[in-house]
Image (cartoon, grey):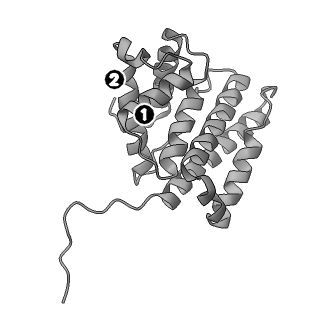
Amino acid sequence: MSETDTSGAARAAEFERWANVFTAHKAFSHPSELHGVLCGRLAAGSRIDEPEWLNMVCEHMGLPENAADDSEDLAPFMNKAYDQTLSHLKSTDMSFHPLLPDDDYAIEQRLEALVAWVRGFLEGMALTAGEALGQAPDEIRELIEDMVAISQLEDDEEASDESEQQLLEITEYIRLGALAVFTEFNEPERPASPSPTLH
C-alpha cells in the first residue's frame, strides 16, 4: 500500500493505526481530534517543528511531556503522520481526508469522531490564524460558521439510510472545506526548476 493510497481501505487502516497508538498509550482523547488540530494548524499556514508537535501530541493524549522520548513507537509514528498529513493537504489530487473511522463502526461512533475532528480543526485554526480569520473571504468565514455548528452536533443519531447519507455529505463538506482553508492561507508551492523568462 503506497503512502498516497487514499482508498477507503487505506483510510480505515490509517484510523486503526492511530487508534491503536492511542489505546496503547491509554490516551483519554480521540485520535480524530488530534488529527483535526494538526490539520487546522497546517491549513491556517503554520508549520510545526518536531519538538513542538510531539509536545502537542503528548498534551492532547494526556501524557507526560517526556512520553515521546520514553516510547519507542510514539515519536516515529507521529512524525510520519505529520509528514503524511501535510503532503495530503498539499497534494493537487485532493487526496486529503479527515482521519475518521469507516462504516464498520456504528453511526454514533462515526459522528462522534467527525465532531471531534471538526472541534480539533477549529481549535488548530484559531491557534494559528487568530484574528486573521476575521479578515478571511466570506466563503471561508461561512465555512467556519458551518463547522462551528457541526462541532455542536449530538451523537444520538439513529442509523438510517438518510442519516448515513447526511453523514457522508457532511464529511465531504468538511474535507473540501479543510482544503479550501489550506488553499486560502498557504502560498502555492513553487516549481523546483526556475522557468525561463521570455524577453
Quadrant in the picture for the C terminus? bottom left
Q: Along the polypeptide, which appears first: circle 2 or circle 1?
A: 1
Depth check: 72 or 112 in front?
Answer: 72
Picture quadrant of residue 117: top right
Tell me which amino acid carries mark 2: Pro
Tell me the residue at 50%/54% (across/down).
Answer: 182
Please provide percent x and percent y for residue 165.
72, 39
Q: Pointer 2: what residue?
A: 76
Q: Give the SS element for disc 1.
A: helix
Q: Pointer 1: what residue?
A: 52
Please provide percent x and percent y for residue 62.
56, 18
**Left or right side of 7 for 73:** left
Please provide percent x and percent y for residue 119.
66, 37
**Is residue 9 something one can see in this rendering?**
no
Quadrant in the picture for the N terminus? top left
**Is residue 68 something one can see in this rendering?**
yes
Tell me the residue at 53%/24% (across/down).
Answer: 59
**Left or right side of 40 for 71:** left
